[in-house]
Image: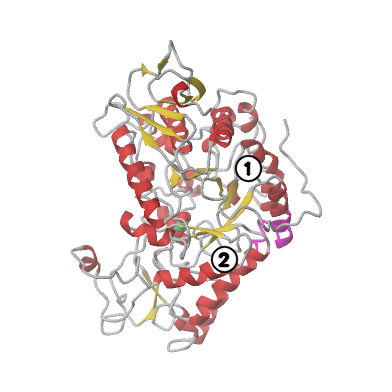
Amino acid sequence: MTFVSSSPQGIVTTTPGTDATWWRQAVVYQIYPRSFADSNGDGVGDLNGITSRADYLQALGVDAVWLSPFYPSALADGGYDVDDYRDVDPMLGTLEDFDRMVAALHARGIKVIVDIVPNHTSNRHAWFRQALAAGRGSDARERYIFREGRGPDGAEPPTDWLSVFGGPAWTRVGDGQWYLHLFAPEQPDLNWNRPDVREDFLVTLRFWADRGVDGFRVDVAHGCAKDMSEPLPTRAELTQGWQGPHPYEDRDEVHEIYASWRQVFNSYDPPRFAVAEAHVPAHRRPRYASAEGLGQAFNFDLLQAPWDAAGFHQVITDNLTLAKESGSSSTWVLSNHDTTRHATRYGLIGADGKAPGGQDGKAWMVAGADPADLYRELGLRRGLAATALILALPGSTYVYQGEELGLHQVTDIPDEARQDPAFHRTPGVEVGRDGCRVPLPWTAVGPSFGFGDASAHLPQPADFARHAVATQWPDPESPLGIYRQLIRTRRALITEEEALTWLPSAPGVLHFARPGGWHCVTNFGVTSCPLPAGRLLTSTRPIEDGLLPANTTVWLQLDSDQRS
Ligand code: GLC
C-alpha cells in the first residue's frame, strides 16, 4: 500500500464549466496542514506532504478538502494569525508547491477550499507594522481599532471586554494607545469601515480563485462589522439584557461585505463557493448562507449535542428548516480543529459518574479532566454511528482529519509542549485545542508514525500505532474501513433531492429515509433493537441475529421503497 504520489504535470488547475452546485452535498475533508503530513522532516506538516497523500484522499472518496491556514504566520494562534494573505509560510512550502498540490487534487476530482481570516491580521502584517510606526491619529492606525485608554493617564483599557482566549481584549502599545483584539494580542482586529481593507480582501479572494481554488471557508464571519462609536458598553452591559445590535457580533452591515464577495465569487465559472464560520443564533444563520451572501454556513449544533436520539432529532429538523429558509444546503460537523474529537466526547463519563452521556465540545479543554473517565471503545462506536448518521443526511458533511482513523483527543500533552493561546492565556484553566491537532499517524513505526522523518511538533501517544493508516487499511471493520465504505456507498446512493422523511421508531432510535429507498437507522440506546426488513447496505457494527446493536447505525434499502 502506498499513498505517496508524485504530482501530475501539465494539469490545468481551474475547472471551468463544472457543476456549480458541487458543494451542496459534498463530503469535505478538513486538513490542518501543520499536522497532516511532513515531507521535509522538520516536524511540521506542509503542502508537499498534502500532495504526497493525494491518493489517500482520493481513496477515502472525499469530494473536497478544506485547508486551515497555510499562510506566513508566527503561529500565535495555529496560523489564524496571518502575516500575508497571498503567500505560503516558508515552513509549509511555496506558491509553486501550492499550485502543484491543487493540480494533484484536481486531477483526482477533489476540490480545494482555503481558509480566509478577515476579522484580524497578525501583528506582523505590513499594515499593523505601519500602524505602530505611524503613531496615534495616523491614517495607518485607522485600519485597526486603536483607542485611548481610560483613567487619568490612559492606563486602563478602553473597555473591560475579554478576549476569546482569556485576558483583556485590548493591548497597549508604546505610545500609550490601545488596540482591540477579540482573540490573541497577536491578532489585531481590522477596521472594516475602511475601503482599502475591503478592497484588499477582494484582491486576496481573486488571487486564490485565479490560482484555481474552488472555495473559501470564512473565519469568524460574524465579527468583521463593528460599531466602535463611543461611549462603548461595558462587558456587564453587553451580557445582561443588551438591547439592539451588538458592537462587534453579527451586525447587519456584515452582509454588505459578503455581498461584495459574492460578486467576486460569481465572476468565476463555476462560481466560487464559500462557507461561513458564524457563531450566531440559529435564526440568524440563513443570511450568511444565502445565495447573495457567502452561500453556506456551518451549524455547530451537533458539536454541542449529547449522544441522545431526541437531541439529534431536534438539531436535524431545525437545521433542515433553516436550510430551506436560506436556499442553501445544511452542514454537518462532528469534529474540527477547535473542538474535542467526537469519539472522546461520546465516551466520557457523565457528571453523574454513570455511563457516558456525551459532553459539549469543550469537554477536554478543561484542565484536570481525568483520562480514566473515558470509555474509549464506547466513544468510538458512538462516533462511528454518529458519522454514519450525518453522512446519510441531506447537505454537506465536514470530516476532520484523523476522525476516519478513530483518533481520540490526546489528553496528556505536557504543558511545555502546548501551543494553543487558550492554554497560555487562561493560564492552564483551559487546556486548549492542541489535543485534536496532534499530527496524523500514517504507519505503525517511525519517528512520528509516518507523519515525517522527525518527531512531530506536538507529541503523539503510543497508541497512534494502532490507529495508523497502514494498520487499518487492510481491515474493512476498522474505523478507516468503515469511513471508506460509508463514503463510497453514499456516493452511489445520493441523489440531487435534498429530502428526508422521518419514520416511526422505538424510543432511543432514529429512522429516516432518503429518496430512492435509502434508509438510515441509528440505535442510541443500550440494548439491541429490531430492524426493518430490507437489504443491508452498510453498518458501523455487525448486525447480530437480525437486530441492530446499541450505538450502531445501519443503512438499508427497503424492499417497499425500491425504485423500479
Ligand atoms: C476561528 C478558528 C479558530 C481561531 C479563531 C480566530 O474560530 O476556527 O481556530 O482560533 O477563529 O481566528
| 548 left or right of 458 in image | left
First along the sequence among labels 2 and 1: 2
Tag 2: amino acid: Asn
Residue 85 visible to an observer of this rendering? no
> In the image, residue 153 lies at what x, y percent?
30, 84
Ligand 1 within 8 angstroms of badge 2 C-beta: no
> In the image, residue 564 lies at what x, y percent?
53, 27
Residue 488 visible to an observer of this rendering? yes
For disc 2, the marked residue is 266
Give me the C-alpha separation between circle 2 and circle 1: 44 Å
| Residue at (51% x, 49% y) in the render | 24
- Residue 133 vs residue 215, the one in the foreground: 215
> In the image, residue 508 lies at what x, y percent?
30, 27
Q: Secondary structure at mark 2?
A: helix
For label 2, the crowd category at 10 Å Cα-Cα, with few meaning under 14, some 14 to 19 and many 20 or more, is few
Tag 1: amino acid: Ser
Range of magenta residues = 84-100
Q: Secondary structure at mark 1?
A: loop
For disc 1, the marked residue is 455
| Outermost residue, top side | 545
| Residue at (62% x, 59% y) in the render | 270
- Residue 128 vs residue 381, the one in the foreground: 381
Picture quadrant of residue 182: bottom left
Picture quadrant of residue 520: top left
| Residue 301: image tag | none
